[in-house]
Image (cartoon, helix red, strand yellow):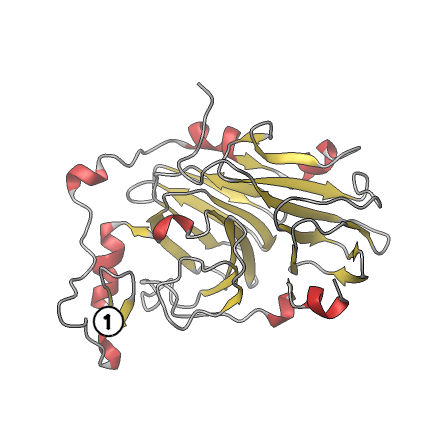
Amino acid sequence: MTPEEMDARIVRYGDLRPCKTAFIDAHTPGSDQKENFTIIGGGVSESLDQHVHIAIPHGFNIGAAGQPPKCRNSLHSHRTAEVFFVLKGRWRFFWGRWGDAGEVVLEEGDIINIPTGIFRGFENIGTDYGMIMAILGGDDAGGGVIWAPQVIEDAADHGLVLGENGRLYDTKAGERLPEGLSPMPLLTEAELADYPEPEALDVVPGHVARCWDLVALAGRKPAKVIGETGLLRDKPGFEVDFVTRASASDAMHTHDRPSVLMPMHGHWRLFWEGGETVLNPGDTASVPADLPHGAVPAMTGEASLYHIVGTDDPAGPTWREG
């Protein structure tokens, strides 16, 4: 693979193209300043304005959300895994029908594997623009987003209507639902009863990993963060490893499917048969299947990255043994 071919599979942080109209809460006060990014895969955006950086199927999607302080993402659910790690800032994740069942605060480098089947939201509680990176299970990410009823109702008050086709229509801009297309129906009370309300003590221990704990665990080999044998045991159709300077190897290796490297701290030298380049925090690199490659820190100082690769496990509800 030539350096030019690899460069086409690397999305640099500075080249990310945001969409400010990606979801139904794009006009709702408190959520109207967020920016969404679709980095790998089609994502779950409800707007035709969303730019997809790399459309190659990986078995999962990579995205990101950028938000100024006090901006939040509204309560929603997914049918497949939704994993976040904090690239910049300080974030509060909350969940439940009304967002008050439980919450946890994550700092830079922390990661959360949010259980499927619950409503969840998040907000930037830091003092500067923040960025979280997201991994969604499946190539189609479960077919889209399921919104809490009040989110759809609030959005309608501000001109946005979601059609049954999963697309947004801005009535304040003169758009209307196409003839024969109905609005996305609200979940009924019977359907809402199927969404659990777990407390923080039921979620945090098995679904949140702290960056500095992962640094300690990745002393000799990469720490398995998400996987059947991971610190956060799950089989969502992909595995996530945490690699540090101490656990990085200059030996080349391959995967039988595309893999993704996402630096958290420091600068990393990605090398392969045909060339090399440097990855920086916020960059996302997609390495082709069966390509011998490796990654090591390029400079002294703190260095860590998240590594994601698909598995043969079906993307679906959060898995627990037994």
* Foreground of the two, 67 or 240: 240
Does 105 appear above or below 202? below
Q: Quadrant of residue 188?
A: top left
Give the secondary structure at mark 1.
loop
> Where residue 305 sits in the image (x, y, percent)?
69, 48
| Res 62 seen here | yes
255 vs 174, left or right, is right
Q: Quadrant of residue 99?
A: top left
114 vs 208, left or right, is left
> Where residue 300 sits in the image (x, y, percent)?
86, 52
Task: Identify the residue position indicated by label 1 in the image.
Answer: 159
Does 129 appear above or below 120? below
Residue found at x 31% / y 63% = 24
Image quadrant holding the N terminus, namely: bottom right
* Foreground of the two, 159 or 165: 165
Amino acid under label 1?
Gly
Q: How many marks?
A: 1
> How many residues crowd around disc 1 within 10 Å: few (fewer than 14), some, or many (20 or more)?
many
> Where residue 47 sits in the image (x, y, percent)?
36, 68
> Where residue 187 sits in the image (x, y, percent)?
20, 47
Residue found at x 54% / y 36% = 208
Image quadrant holding the C terminus, namely: top left
